[in-house]
Image: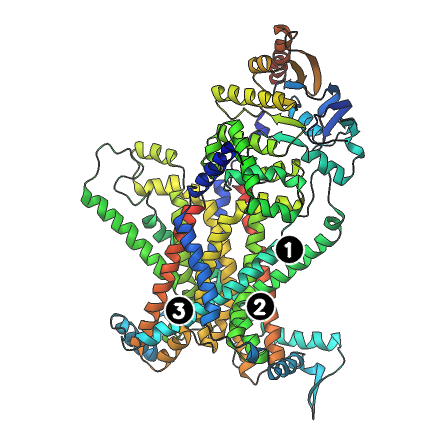
């Protein structure tokens, strides 16, 4: 059973996902230990986002099974699924904050899954001192405490991504999932954000799974890399073992295919 | 509490104190709420009278007279309901739809309903044409000394102020046009023109010219600038830029607003008939004037509901088509 | 990419021309159907006299009735504000019931039992009620109330509040349902319920639009309130009608100017609000 303050692991057993006629993932087997940090690499359209969404139960597998902390997601009740989601922080690619709310309210929104309607309304409208302090401390950890009461849409893209991280941490999660969290940020900020996420998960002992486009960054910041291409798992090795050839295979093949398509 | 924790609390409090706030928004909201509360305090609202027993009896009597006449009969104790009969009700309704009423100059409900639609169509087309005259002069990106040109030689202050005057006065005209309620406009025009259709058409057209003129001017101001700058660089003048660059760009939005206003025109046109103008409202008013025939009055009001709902659906379909096409 | 896969030109020019021609054609049909002619635009003798008297007084409004005008104007504003307060409550409540976002379910968990059974029915009924409230004009509501139990200040307020409440409900629900779903999906993924997603993910996003629209409707309510003066309510419309019927055109202009002034103020005000807060 998933419980706060205790990292959770994930397991995919022969998972396939189809959207209509297109196969997003085919027969993927993957085991992620509690507390591990894993980077999902691969070209866009390889199925990285779908894989992440399987892990917090916002996408249902067409076949195969997804386990979070040993529980099969498919067998969970509605309340169980809600509890699981509330315990997993998710940092989205973009557009995930309410732009015309203040930062503090966006951070508070992280706890909605653990609160009833009335108590969540109270914290959103009139946050208690302790709640405001917790939000402040999390913003301090991501480096923008002075923005606590700023309107979210006045922040830069990188700062907004940090607010999203703070919101995910406010959930008191057991695992963090991040879907291309740096795709809309300039390269210097990208490194900061990735390092921030890996550092925080290490310190808190959280499982971290991040999809990421930048291979350099992935290799430097993550001990384990999982390569995906066209919905299939291509490699699953530690960062040191992944050779240049494998990276090239991930991308060059795709180029070759595109050439073939165009001909 | 430790010193550090105390520090943090103080910093949070300071951040909260200094958070950016919009004075204007707060002021507007405050005024709005104050006005709404004050209206109930200052207004002459007598709840005891409104919900008195006598008014309850009135309501009961009214509910009875709303029944189609063949389905009730007068006894010593007033009207009494006869058992409901769909055939009789349908006959009665058919008669209202097709047979004329003495002074209302129509052949019944259907004709009046079509007349209402016709008034709304003519009025909104006139308003659209009128707004297309005004909107260019109210758009700040067109009505300026050097439209869409990089300011190589800045224009003199006189020309700048002259154009500002054009924009300002056009906007004032548009506000004045839309500030008068259609009903009052129609009332005034009707006393000067004898015709049953023109006052309604003109009143709706004037009001909606003001509204569409403002909306179209806003659309023009939001048109992408770059293609227009290119046109200007090719030597196109204002008129040419407007015809070739701006009009194709604003047309979909122009149509969206057109249909949206047509929908409201149908609603208003229904009512303007009360002034004895050629719409459904005439029948509604006649039913009351000819001896409080509430059954007919309510019937024609319900016919108006159908008409407005038809207008809504047509407008929604047209707007969806425009959206999909653009 | 083959030529058959080339994107269709958005709104082709030929279609645009056809649409405009159809609309103009409809206007011509309406003109003929209504038996209209341009000769009817020339007033007859009586009309000409009224027109001359009326327009020559435009520059000479009567200052004597200024006090009356301001008092009637106050009444007009009071009716409009009271009606707005009721219709805002109606609009928020019915707008909530008329939107789908809070019960239409999450992509994986599906709808709750409530969302599958009660909510769609409630939604349908609310949509119907809103449609009916909106399609009867406030003047007709006033006539109905007049017939049913006589016109009282409260029934005048309710006559405006019913159609306005329906309109606000429709527009509010559309604004909320159509606001950006990105934040909503994120909150869903963090385990938030449909209600929480609705109120903390969607409503805040739509709030500036809703506010600007409510201000605009207040301006409309002022006009409606003035018009109800022609139907036995003590607003400025009654003064206009009385003065006009007794040929006191100077007074008519005083009332018109005062009414226009306050409506222009609200028009400019709500325009500024929209420009500042609705990007």
Query: In the picture shown, does residue A65 fall above or below B204?
Result: above
Ranked by sequence position, the earlier of labels 3 and 2 is 3
Direction from residue A157 to residue A226 in the image, left or right:
right
Q: Residue at x 50, y 60 (%)?
A: B264
Q: Mark 1 lies on which chain?
A: C
What colouring method underlies this structural image?
A: rainbow
Q: Do the residues at pointers 3 and 2 share their chain?
A: yes
Query: In the picture shown, does residue A127 fall above or below A186?
Result: below
Residue pointed to by mark 2: B304
Q: What element carries label 1?
A: helix
Q: Can residue B197 be seen in this view?
A: no
Residue pointed to by mark 1: C97
Dot 1 crowding, Cα within 10 Å, few <14, some 14–19, many 20+: many
Camera-near label (2 vs 1) is: 1
Q: Which of B8 and C59 is in front in this view?
A: B8
Percent coordinates x, y for residue A208 in the rendering: 65, 23
Percent coordinates x, y for residue C143 in the rendering: 54, 75
3 and 1 marks in contact (CB < 8 Å): no
Q: Is mark 3 on a helix, strand or loop?
A: helix
- Pick the quarter of the image with the N terminus of chain B: top right
Q: Which of A53 and B147 is in front in this view?
A: A53
Badge number at residue B185 = 3
Percent coordinates x, y for residue C94 in the rendering: 61, 58
Dot 3 crowding, Cα within 10 Å, few <14, some 14–19, many 20+: some
Q: Do the residues at pointers 3 and 1 share their chain?
A: no
Direction from residue B37 to residue A250 in the image, left or right:
right
Q: Which chain carries label 2?
A: B
Query: In the picture shown, does residue A193 fall above or below C278?
Result: above
Q: Residue at x 45, y 73 (%)?
A: B196
Q: Which chain carries label 3?
A: B
């Amino acid at each position: 059973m998933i419980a706060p303050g205790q990292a959770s692991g994930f397991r995919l057993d022969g998972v396939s996902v189809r959207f209509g006629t297109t196969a997003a993932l085919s027969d993927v087997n993957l085991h992620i230990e509690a507390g591990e940090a894993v980077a999902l690499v691969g070209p866009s359209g390889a199925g990285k986002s779908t894989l992440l969404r399987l892990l917090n139960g916002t996408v249902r597998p067409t076949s195969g099974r997804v386990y979070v902390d040993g529980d099969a997601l498919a067998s969970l009740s509605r309340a169980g699924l809600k509890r699981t989601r509330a315990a997993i922080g998710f940092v989205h690619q973009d557009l995930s904050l309410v732009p015309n709310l203040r930062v503090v309210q966006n951070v508070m929104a992280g706890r909605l899954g653990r609160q009833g309607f009335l108590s969540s309304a109270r914290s959103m409208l009139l946050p208690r001192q302790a709640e405001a302090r917790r939000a402040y401390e999390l913003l301090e950890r991501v480096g923008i405490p002075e923005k606590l009461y700023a309107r979210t849409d006045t922040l830069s893209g990188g700062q907004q991504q940090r607010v999203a991280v703070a919101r995910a941490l406010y959930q008191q999660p057991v695992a963090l999932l991040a879907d291309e969290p740096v795709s809309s940020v300039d390269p210097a900020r990208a490194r900061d954000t990735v390092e921030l996420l890996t550092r925080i998960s290490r310190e808190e002992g959280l499982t971290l799974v991040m999809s990421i486009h930048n291979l350099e960054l992935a290799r430097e910041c993550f001990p384990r890399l999982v390569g995906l291409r066209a919905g299939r798992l291509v490699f699953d090795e530690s960062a040191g073992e992944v050779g240049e050839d494998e990276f090239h295979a991930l991308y060059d093949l795709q180029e070759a295919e595109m050439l073939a398509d165009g001909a | 509490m430790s010193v550090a924790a105390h520090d943090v609390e103080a910093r949070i409090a300071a951040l909260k104190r200094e958070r950016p706030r919009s004075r204007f928004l707060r002021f507007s909201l405050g005024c709005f709420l104050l006005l709404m509360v004050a209206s109930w305090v200052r207004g002459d609202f007598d709840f005891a009278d409104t919900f008195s027993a006598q008014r309850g009896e009135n309501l009961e009597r009214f509910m009875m007279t709303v029944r189609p006449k063949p389905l009730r009969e007068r006894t010593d104790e007033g009207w009494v309901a006869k058992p409901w009969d769909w055939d009789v009700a349908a006959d009665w309704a058919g008669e209202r739809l097709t047979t004329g009423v003495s002074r209302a100059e129509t052949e019944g409900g259907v004709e009046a309903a079509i007349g209402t639609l016709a008034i709304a169509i003519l009025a909104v087309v006139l308003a659209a044409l009128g707004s297309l005259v005004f909107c260019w002069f109210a758009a700040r990106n067109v009505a300026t000394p050097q439209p869409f040109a990089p300011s190589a030689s800045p224009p003199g202050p006189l020309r700048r102020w002259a154009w500002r005057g054009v924009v300002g006065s056009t906007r004032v005209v548009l506000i004045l046009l839309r500030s008068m309620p259609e009903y009052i406009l129609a009332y005034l025009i009707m006393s000067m023109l004898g015709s049953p259709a023109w006052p309604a058409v003109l009143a709706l057209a004037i009001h909606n010219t003001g509204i569409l003129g403002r909306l179209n001017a806003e659309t023009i101001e939001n048109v992408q600038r770059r293609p227009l700058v290119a046109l200007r660089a090719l030597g196109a003048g204002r008129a040419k830029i407007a015809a070739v660059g701006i009009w194709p760009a604003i047309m979909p939005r122009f149509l969206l607003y057109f249909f949206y206003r047509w929908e409201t025109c149908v609603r208003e046109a229904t009512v303007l008939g009360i002034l004895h103008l050629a719409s459904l409202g005439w029948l509604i008013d006649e039913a009351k004037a000819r001896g409080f025939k509430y059954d007919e009055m309510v019937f024609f009001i319900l016919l108006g509901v159908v008409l407005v709902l038809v207008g809504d659906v047509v407008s929604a379909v047209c707007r969806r088509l425009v959206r999909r096409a653009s | 990419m083959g030529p058959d896969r080339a994107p269709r030109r958005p709104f082709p020019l030929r279609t645009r021309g056809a649409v405009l021609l159809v609309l103009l054609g409809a206007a011509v049909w309406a003109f003929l159907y209504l038996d209209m002619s341009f000769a009817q635009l020339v007033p007859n003798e009586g009309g000409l006299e009224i027109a001359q008297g009326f327009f020559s007084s435009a520059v000479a409004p009567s200052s004597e009735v200024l006090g009356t005008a301001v008092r009637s104007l106050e009444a007009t504003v009071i009716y409009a504000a009271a009606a707005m307060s009721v219709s805002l409550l109606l609009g928020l409540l019915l707008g909530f019931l008329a939107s789908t976002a809070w019960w239409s379910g999450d992509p994986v968990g599906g709808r709750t039992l409530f969302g599958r059974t009660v909510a769609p029915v409630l939604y349908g009924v609310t949509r119907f009620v809103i449609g009916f409230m909106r399609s009867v004009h406030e003047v007709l509501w006033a006539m109905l109330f007049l017939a049913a139990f006589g016109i009282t200040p409260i029934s005048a307020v309710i006559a405006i509040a019913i159609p306005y409440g329906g309109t606000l409900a429709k527009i509010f629900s559309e604004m909320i349902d159509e606001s950006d779903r990105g934040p909503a999906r994120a909150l869903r993924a963090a385990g938030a319920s449909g209600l929480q997603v609705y109120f903390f993910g969607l409503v805040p996003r739509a709030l500036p639009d809703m506010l600007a629209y409510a201000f605009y409707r207040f301006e409309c309510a002022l006009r409606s309130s003035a018009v109800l003066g022609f139907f036995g309510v003590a607003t400025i419309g009654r003064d206009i009608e009385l003065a006009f019927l007794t040929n006191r055109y100077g007074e008519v202009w005083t009332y018109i100017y005062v009414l226009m002034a306050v409506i222009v103020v609200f028009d400019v005000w709500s325009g500024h609000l929209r420009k500042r807060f609705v990007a």
